[in-house]
Amino acid sequence: MARSAKLVTVALEAAGLSKRFAGRVAVHNVSFTLKAGEVLALIGPNGAGKTTLLSMLAGGLAPSAGELHPSGAAGIGWVPQQTAIYSKLSIAENLRLFARLEGVTEPETAVDAMLEQTGLRERSDDAVGRLSGGNRQRVNIAVGLIANPAVLLLDEPTASLDPRQRARLWEFINLRVAAGTSVAFATHEIGEAERYASQLLLLADGEMLFLGSPAELCTAAQEGNLDRAFLALLAARGH
Ligand SMILES: Nc1ncnc2c1ncn2[C@@H]1O[C@H](COP(=O)(O)OP(=O)(O)OP(=O)(O)O)[C@@H](O)[C@H]1O
Ligand SMILES: [Mg+2]
């Protein structure tokens, strides 16, 4: 009986990616592959280069060196830490505006799909400024997803949310992951990285100290707990 081969599609590939700002290295020689439907967490101390790396992946910042496939913003959804949505506009108006800005061919269909997926249809006429932090962040992510990108990049998406709002937001993101969207996100919550990511990329002072699964990080640091493994690996490398 013929068996169909399981094709592994690469959604995003970075090879030797670096960024300098006026002689200062923010990201140095980062390489990784993100497969379709895979979730990667960027972890590392403040100033490690996580936002700089995400900005390059999003096509918003030109690398100083290295290769990126695909390059540019096509097929990439970008959810920056500072929300770009307009607080005085309603949820539907924001989605419609960004669908047009992104050149979505059928904006109303895309808006409708996002209202459905966010579970915010009954709030669609409410001004975004009146929403809870968790719901506002759903709209922010829906804007990143409006053009149905293959890859979604998120910078500390749950930073200001309580644990319940955080779990609800991940339910929403994971629906897209189950449908084949790849995700890379930055976080300071090691527990969140462990729970939702299959790959961890540990950055410190722009250097990639580790790339692998949470279990592999524990093994590398000889620690049973990921929080301790993270700190131990940083300390061992002088951070
Ligand atoms: N536009 C810029 N011009 C000059 N330096 C920059 C610029 N953007 C970032 N940097 C520097 O690059 C380094 C990495 O910063 P980045 O914001 O990427 O870190 P991060 O890991 O996202 O930190 P945090 O956890 O605090 O968000 C820092 O030293 C920062 O000061
Ligand atoms: Mg950052």
Image (spheres, rainbow, N blue to C red):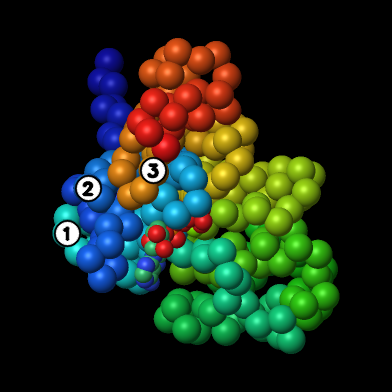
Question: Which residue ends up furthest to the front in the rendered image?
Answer: 238
Q: Secondary structure at mark 2?
A: strand
Answer yes or no: do the residues labelled 2 and 1 have beta carbons within 8 Å? Answer: yes
Residue sitting at x 47%, y 19%: 218
Badge number at residue 162: none
Residue sitting at x 36%, y 31%: 237
The disc, 2 or 1, on the residue closer to the chain's N-terminal end is: 2
Above or below 234: residue 133: below
The disc, 2 or 3, on the residue closer to the chain's N-terminal end is: 2
Q: Is residue 111 visible?
A: yes
Q: Which amino acid type is marked by label 3?
A: Leu
Q: Which amino acid type is marked by label 2?
A: Asn
Q: Quadrant of the N terminus?
A: top left
Q: Tag 1: Cα neighbours inside 10 Å, few (<14), some, or many (≥20)?
A: some
In the figure, residue 34 lies in which quadrant?
top left
Q: Tag 3: Cα neighbours inside 10 Å, few (<14), some, or many (≥20)?
A: many
Badge 2 is on which residue? 29
Badge number at residue 203: 3
Badge 1 is on which residue? 65
149 horizontally vs 141: left or right: left
Is the CB atom of the residue marked by disc 3 within 8 angstroms of ligand 1's nearest atom?
yes
Q: Quadrant of the C terminus?
A: top left
Residue sitting at x 23%, y 66%: 23
Q: Secondary structure at mark 1?
A: strand
